[in-house]
Structures are given as C-alpha cells and as structure tokens.
Image (spheres, grey):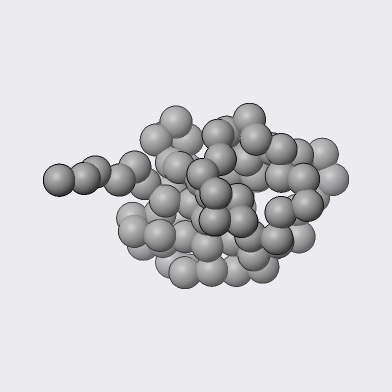
C-alpha cells in the first residue's frame, strides 16, 4: 500500500511517501497507524497522539476504525484549520 505523509507528520518521519506491505492482522486505519508507530523513533513521534492524526483512504477521509479493505493508498496528515 502506498502511504503518504503530510505537514509535520512528514517532517517527523522524514519521508513524503513509501510503499508498505501491510502485515496480516492489520485491518483498520488505527491498526496501521499503530504498526507504523512501532517502526522507529520518527514514526513514534508522528503517531504519538493518534487521536489528532487524520487519514484518507484513496483520497477519502477515513475514521480510525475504517477498514483498509482493498485501498491502494492512505495519507496521514494533521488536522487542518480554515479561515
């Protein structure tokens, strides 16, 4: 699955994007975030407060409990503000 990182999530991880082989048993957005957080210090910092990191599956906003299903892409980003 292609994983995209934006704003401070990208800065903490140090990557804009990567291909990730989603392990068996990782079925939701939250489970993928937890899996990524365990991959190293930058990932842990990016996902240290998973309640504030937002996600989009195949360019559609997704809640933490959303199943990954057959999605080809997921993006993680901080909350956005408007003005």
Count of numbered tags = 0
Vertical position of residue 9 compared to residue 65: above or below: below
Q: Is residue 55 visible?
A: yes
The answer to whether residue 29 is above or below residue 2 is above
- Residue depicted at x 71% and y 38%: 67
The relative height of residue 12 versus residue 34 in the rendered view (above or below) is below
Point out the image quarter for the C terminus: top left
* Left or right: residue 83 compared with residue 81: left
- The answer to which of 36 and 83 lies nearer the viewer is 83
State the image coordinates of residue 52 (x, y, percent, origin top left): 39, 35
Residue 62 is left or right of residue 77, and the answer is right
Q: Quadrant of residue 59?
A: bottom right
Of all residues shown, which one is farthest toward the right?
A: 24
- In this rendering, the answer to whether 64 lies above or below 74 is above
Residue 42 placed where, x, y %? 46, 55
> What residue is at 51 percent from the left and 44 percent from the top?
61
Q: Is residue 41 visible?
A: no
Q: Position of residue 1 (x, y in %)?
A: 70, 61
Task: Point out residue 56 in the picture as x, y percentages from the top left corner.
Answer: 53, 49
Q: Could you say which quadrant of the image residue 20 lies in?
A: bottom right
Q: Quadrant of residue 30?
A: top right
User: Residue placed at 63% from the left, 30% from the top?
Assistant: 65
28 and 41: which one is in front? 28
Which residue corresponds to the image point at 61% horizontal and 56% vertical from the top-left?
58
């Amino acid at each position: 699955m292609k994983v995209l990182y934006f704003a401070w999530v990208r800065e903490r991880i140090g990557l804009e994007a990567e291909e990730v082989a989603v392990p068996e048993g990782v079925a939701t957005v939250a489970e993928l975030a937890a899996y990524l957080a365990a991959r190293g210090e930058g990932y842990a910092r990016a996902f240290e407060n998973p309640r504030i990191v937002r996600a989009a599956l195949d360019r559609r906003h997704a809640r933490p409990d959303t199943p990954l299903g057959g999605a080809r892409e997921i993006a993680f980003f901080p909350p956005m503000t408007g003005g």
